[in-house]
Amino acid sequence: MLVHRSPWARSVEAGHPSPESWVLREGAAVFVTRRARPGRVATRSFVWVPVMQGERVTALLSLQSYRTGAFGSWHVHLLEDVAAHVSLALANAGHYSAAQEDRRRLEALHVLEMGVAGSADERQIAEAVFNAFRSYLVASHYVLAYLDAQGRLTGFGSESGGPIDRLEPQPVDRTHFFQRLVETGTAIVERVPEHLREPLSAQGWATADQRFPQQTIWVPRHV
């Protein structure tokens, strides 16, 4: 694809110098010479070849030159061959990443199973659950909540790897997410509503962290 005498290329060359060598304009990306070179020269020839995974484009390969007519069909075929190898490499990397993720998940479940099996009370169960969580994912707050003998919501929580604290019992009708879990019986994965991020919100437990969570995951345990 040639951009010689293109008004678009001329506008790029006449533009203000940028510390970046890439320029994005109207859906295209080209190189522009850096400041150290007298004047500015936009890419005069470039080739874009997609990297495909089935029917899906997963990446792009490009050849670009400041010379006009720098590329021909030979360069296109070469880049297409390279794209095929890149596609295979990306697929292998994806399979390896998925296998590693499955391995980590199984390790976390094993840690959880062994920890819960040796637990003598609710606090130790919470500790086993949080330890398994931390080995698999990163979050600012971990909560294990359940109903006490009076039907109030209580449990244990931990902030950013800190100690485990007991959560003060809360009436269920003052909860937000737990009521929805009871009504729907399905997991909740969503952004925390704005009104729950207010400092004076009574729907929740106090924490030492002054920040407010942006996203939350609640999963029900059916008995």
Image: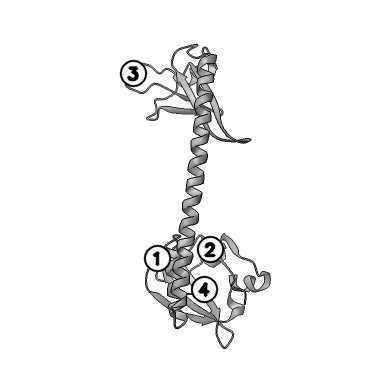
Alpha carbon distance from label 1 to label 4: 17 Å
Mark 2 burial class by Cα count in 10 Å: few <14, some 14-19, many 20+: some
The mark nearer the N terminus, 2 or 1, is 1
Residue sitting at the far left: 36
Question: Residue at position x 48%, y 11% from top?
Answer: 68
Q: Which residue is mark 2?
A: 216
Viewer-side label of 2, 4: 2
Question: Which mark is in front, 3 or 1?
Answer: 1
The one of 12 and 70 positioned closer to us in this rendering: 70
| Nearer to us: label 3 or label 2 | 2
Real-space Cα separation, disc 2 to disc 1, in angstroms: 15 Å
Q: Residues within 10 Å of mark 3 (few under 14, many from 20)?
A: few
> Contact, CB < 8 Å: mark 2 with mark 1?
no
Which secondary structure, mark 4?
Answer: loop
Using the rendered view, name the quadrant where residue 172 is placed: bottom right
**Alpha-carbon span between mark 3 and mark 2:** 51 Å
Residue annotated with mark 4 = 204
Amino acid type, residue under disc 3 in the picture: Arg
Q: Amino acid at mark 2?
A: Thr
Q: Could you say which is closer to the camera, residue 174 or residue 198?
A: 174
- Relative height, residue 156 to residue 67 (above, below): below
Q: Which residue is mark 3?
A: 37
